[in-house]
Image (cartoon, helix red, strand yellow):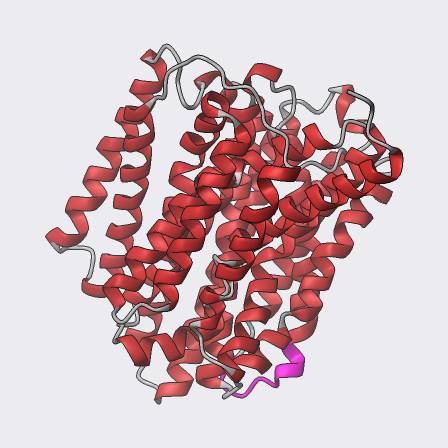
């Protein structure tokens, strides 16, 4: 076969990049696209304050809990095949979610969306790397890919606000249908296929970690609703501990584990996973609660609420290039610690809100948050993939993405408990009590960043003399 002409090859790769980024953006922003519509969804479908968080958690838990299984399926069955199957299911689930007539059906459809994302997303980076073999082109493509991951959640809030304001919250979900159909039409022609590999799927490992994490979040949501002493809270929390311990034991004994335990032997990598859980938990919850504050307390429309996030979104994209510039000039430990402290300052600043805070006063702390979070996410991805053997690359990148999704889900569940407790014990009038609850949430989220700083110090001190820390930062993304 004759080689592809340069101009045709460039066009082909441009379409590949468009397909992969389109899928990544569609599934990343779907975790947050309903955020600005939560008040409308609550009124239309009859959610309670605590159960409302399941609109987010159903998606994120299924997504994060099954990512490792999805990555393994791509290895065994072929990346393009699994990518197409996941995208097709996501498209169908989006149609079901957009038309859902009840709270129960909406949550079920969101769960299906998360499951589909877990199988489609792990293939995106592998397909991207296969399609861009030249180092310079690959670096540029991965930089754009990283920006999409970092900014996807805030972009989702903006887009969701536009649809909720001018059409309906349902269009934030239904818009995925034509996008999904377009991706499905282009994928067989443009995406390369990888050869299937022999092996087994660690079903027990996947089920134990998924059900265990789901039980943990369910228990936390129930604690916010009915308290810590109820059997409805204690039973799932106890079951989550048992299942997660069982998961570790299963992985230690499995011949082909879904998560090789050796990946946790590095203090650097383990710290990166924990740090990611903490900062994503803080930021994801900020999107959720700040959107409600802006609408319920400050009276903003869904569109105006979405527009508030534009400066932060710009910072997420800008930090990709800032890290590429700073990497050769500033050591990674200093850059990571500085970014976490910066994000913590932004969150502490945001926690000063009350029922009369002008909206314009919220923008500066969001900008500071965007700078710190944008840099930290890139560096924690880099640390999370450090010294991973090529044979473990899929599992390693899956762990990074799993930490991202599970961090958001656990953080939201915990801070829902915090919000409920703060509002319950506040005798002030409605809007004032709500504002106090949101302020308390952001105070606790500041603590998440403080913990992340401690984790980073421990992680980085353990390897402070390693020469690789002074090497240029590689902008990487999880598959």
- The picture places residue 224, in percent across and down from the top left corner, at 27, 62
Viewer can see residue 439: no
In magenta, the rendered stretch is 354-362
- Residue closer to the observer: 66 or 323: 66
Work out whether 164 lies above or below 27.
below
- The picture places residue 33, in percent across and down from the top left corner, at 50, 65
- Residue closer to the observer: 475 or 428: 475
- Residue closer to the observer: 452 or 26: 26
Screen quadrant of the N terminus: top right
- The picture places residue 418, in percent across and down from the top left corner, at 36, 63
**Residue farthest left in this picture:** 231
Is residue 462 shown left or right of residue 437?
right
- The picture places residue 103, in percent across and down from the top left corner, at 26, 67
Viewer can see residue 297: yes
Q: How many marks?
A: 0
Q: Residue at x 65, y 67 (%)?
A: 366
Q: Residue at x 64, y 56 (%)?
A: 151
Q: Residue at x 62, y 52 (%)?
A: 22
Q: Is residue 361 magenta?
A: yes
**Residue farthest front in this picture:** 1
Is residue 220 shown left or right of residue 437?
left
Work out whether 240 lies above or below 269.
below
Is residue 203 shown left or right of residue 35?
left
Q: Is residue 290 magenta?
A: no
Screen quadrant of the C terminus: top right
């Amino acid at each position: 076969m004759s080689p592809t002409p340069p101009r045709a090859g460039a066009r082909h790769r441009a379409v590949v990049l468009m397909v992969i980024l389109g899928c990544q953006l569609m599934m990343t922003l779907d975790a947050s696209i309903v955020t600005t519509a939560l008040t409308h969804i609550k009124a239309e479908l009859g959610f309670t304050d605590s159960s409302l968080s399941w609109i987010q958690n159903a998606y994120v838990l299924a997504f994060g809990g099954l990512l490792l299984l999805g990555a393994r399926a791509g290895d065994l069955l072929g990346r393009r095949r699994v990518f197409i199957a996941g995208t097709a299911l996501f498209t169908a689930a989006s149609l079901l979610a957009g038309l859902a007539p009840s709270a129960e059906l909406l949550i079920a459809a969101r769960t299906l969306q998360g499951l589909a994302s877990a199988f489609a997303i792990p293939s995106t980076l592998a397909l991207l790397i296969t399609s861009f073999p030249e180092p310079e082109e690959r670096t540029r493509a991965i930089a754009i890919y990283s920006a999409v991951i970092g900014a996807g959640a805030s972009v989702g809030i903006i887009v969701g606000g536009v649809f909720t304001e001018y059409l309906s919250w349902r269009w934030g979900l239904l818009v995925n249908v034509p996008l999904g159909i377009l991706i499905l039409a282009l994928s067989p022609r443009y995406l390369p296929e990888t050869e299937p590999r022999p092996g087994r799927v660690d079903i027990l490992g996947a089920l134990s970690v998924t059900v265990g994490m789901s039980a943990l979040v369910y228990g936390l949501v129930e604690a916010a609703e009915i308290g810590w002493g109820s059997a409805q809270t204690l039973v799932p929390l106890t079951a989550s501990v048992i299942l997660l311990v069982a998961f570790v034991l299963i992985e230690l004994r499995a011949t082909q584990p879904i998560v090789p335990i050796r990946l946790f032997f590095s203090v650097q990598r383990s710290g990166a996973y924990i740090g990611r859980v903490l900062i994503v938990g803080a930021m994801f919850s900020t999107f959720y609660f700040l959107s409600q504050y802006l609408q319920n307390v400050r009276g903003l429309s869904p569109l105006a609420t979405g527009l508030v996030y534009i400066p932060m979104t710009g910072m997420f994209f800008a930090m990709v290039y800032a890290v590429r510039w700073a990497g050769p000039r500033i050591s990674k430990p200093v850059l990571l610690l500085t970014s976490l402290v910066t994000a913590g300052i932004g969150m502490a600043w945001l926690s000063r809100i009350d029922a009369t805070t002008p909206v314009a006063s919220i923008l500066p702390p969001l900008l500071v948050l965007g700078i710190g979070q944008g840099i930290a996410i890139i560096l924690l991805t880099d640390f999370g993939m450090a010294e991973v053997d090529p044979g473990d690359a899929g599992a390693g990148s899956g762990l990074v993405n799993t930490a991202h999704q599970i961090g958001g889900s656990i953080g939201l569940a915990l801070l829902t408990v915090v919000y409920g407790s703060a509002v319950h014990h506040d005798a002030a009038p409605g809007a004032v009590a709500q504002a106090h609850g949101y302020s308390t949430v952001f105070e606790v989220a500041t603590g998440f960043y403080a913990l992340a700083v401690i984790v980073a110090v421990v992680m980085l001190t353990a390897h402070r003399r390693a020469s690789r820390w002074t090497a240029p930062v590689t902008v990487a993304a999880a598959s």
